[in-house]
Amino acid sequence: METYGLKAGEYDALLAAQGGGCAICRGVRRYRLAVDHNHRTGLVRGLLCNMCNSRLLTAARDKPEVLRSAADYLDAPPARKHIGDRYYQKEQA
Ligand SMILES: [Zn+2]
């Protein structure tokens, strides 16, 4: 029996190797994680939660450089450097 490129027992072994959670966010889920693969080549990459698989990687267009850039952005937001610490507060009605 094979599911999304994994043979019997490989899902559980891979999940254990990933520490029991999503390979990206490390989140543990009650549901089975998605078997993520490269849609162009078919290469099986690992097990991901729905958020990381369908949102994070889709938004990043599967490009590692986009994800590295996003991490840099969060570590050093450009607005902080150029206008200082500014806090947006939603106006009270
Ligand atoms: Zn995740």
Image: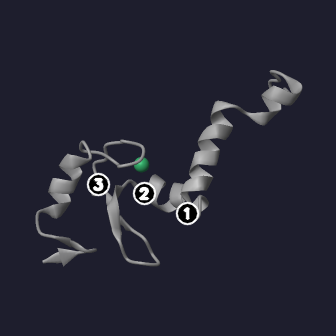
Q: Is residue 18 visible?
A: yes
Q: Residue furthest top?
A: 85
Q: Position of residue 58 (x, y in %)?
A: 55, 63
Q: Position of residue 22 (x, y in %)?
A: 35, 48
* Structural crowding at the residue carrying mark 3, measured as other residues with C-alpha within 10 Å and reported as few (<14), some (14–19) or many (≥20): few
Q: Earlier in the sequence, mark 2 or mark 3?
A: 3
- 50 vs 80: above or below: below
Element class at badge 2:
helix
Q: Quadrant of residue 3?
A: bottom left
Q: Earlier in the sequence, mark 3 or mark 1?
A: 3
Q: Single out the mark in the foreground, 2 or 3.
A: 2
Q: Cβ of disc 2 within 8 Å of ligand 1?
A: yes
Give the amino acid type for the residue marked by disc 1 in the picture.
Thr
Q: Earlier in the sequence, mark 1 or mark 2?
A: 2
The colour style of the image is one colour
Q: Position of residue 92 (x, y in %)?
A: 84, 26
Mark number for residue 23?
none
In the rendered image, the quadrant that contains the N terminus is bottom left
- Position of 82 with respect to 55 (left or right) is right
Element class at badge 1:
helix
Q: Which residue is mark 3?
A: 31
- 54 vs 16: above or below: below
Separation of marks 3 and 1 at Cα, in angstroms: 21 Å
Q: Across the whole image, how many numbered discs are drawn on residues?
A: 3
- 75 vs 15: above or below: above
Mark number for residue 58?
1
Mark number for residue 50?
2
Give the amino acid type for the residue marked by disc 2 in the picture.
Asn
Q: Single out the mark in the foreground, 1 or 2.
A: 1
* Structural crowding at the residue carrying mark 2, measured as other residues with C-alpha within 10 Å and reported as few (<14), some (14–19) or many (≥20): some
Q: Quadrant of residue 10?
A: bottom left
